[in-house]
Image (tube, rainbow, N blue to C red):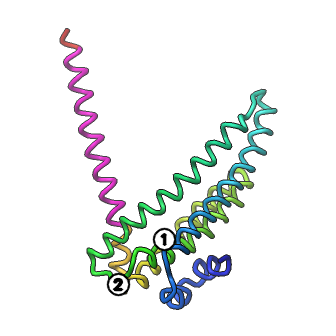
Amino acid sequence: MFNEWIETLLSPGTAFTKMVKNANLGAGIQHLVVGYSIYGILAFIAATLFGTMMGGALGTGFGTGSSIIATIIGIIIGISFGLIFGGIIWVFAKLLGGTGSYGAQLHMTSAPLAFVLVLQGILSFIPFVGPMIGALISLYYLYPLTLAIKEAHNLSTLKALAAWVLPIIIVFVLLAIFAAILGAALLGALGAANQY
């Protein structure tokens, strides 16, 4: 499993070509569960260590019990988001002419993601610089993500890119519309309140 993570992140072009024949849903879920669990545990340890150091310096405590619960909830949310967003990508890939299965796509996209999560967990021990490096690694993940979708669905690179970019654009447009409606409603309510 770990060799697959490294290979898909460092040489995705060759890794996905070999991987597509045996890619399956079970392995994809396994990558998500293990990746998010390792990340959650590492991030919890780092937050506990740095929180304790900062808490001692600032005269405040760090709630370990609540952070354990937050870690577990974060792992569950991460896995759920991976499954849901994988499904959304699958729908868009199909709309763009893709031929792959959800399971193959999830396996191929979650293998490099799991490695990115582990790297981010390790980087969480480096204050200030670690999150910046983690953000750069996350941006790099978009390259293997695109290649995985391309290979899983037998799409062109542009269509594979569109399969994950279009849902993000749609979400941002919907959020902007919702914010505009909410803002207009609040302004209307404030205007009505000023009349009385």
Compared with 185, 155 (above or below) is: below
Q: Residue at x 47, y 57 (%)?
A: 81
Magenta span has 179? Answer: yes
Question: In this rendering, would 195 be left or right of 157?
Answer: left
Towards the viewer: 180 or 110 = 110
Question: In this rendering, would 1 be left or right of 110?
Answer: right
In the rendering, at what x and y percent does residue 169 appear?
32, 60
Could you tell me which quadrant the C terminus lies in?
Answer: top left
Amino acid type at circle 1 is: Leu
Look at mark 1 in the image and give the residue it sits on: 142
Amino acid type at circle 2 is: Leu
The magenta segment is 165-193
Per the image, label 2 sits on a secondary structure element best described as loop
The answer for how far apart the CA atoms under marks 1 and 2 are is: 16 Å
Query: Mark 1 or 2 closer to N-term?
Result: 1
Q: Residues within 10 Å of mark 1 (few under 14, many from 20)?
A: some
Compared with 71, 181 (above or below) is: above
In the rendering, at what x and y percent does residue 140 appear?
54, 71
Q: Find residue 155 and name its label.
A: 2
- Outermost residue toward the front in this view: 26
Q: Residues within 10 Å of mark 2 (few under 14, many from 20)?
A: many
Most frequent secondary structure within the magenta stretch:
helix
Magenta span has 113? Answer: no
Q: Residue at x 37, y 77 (%)?
A: 160
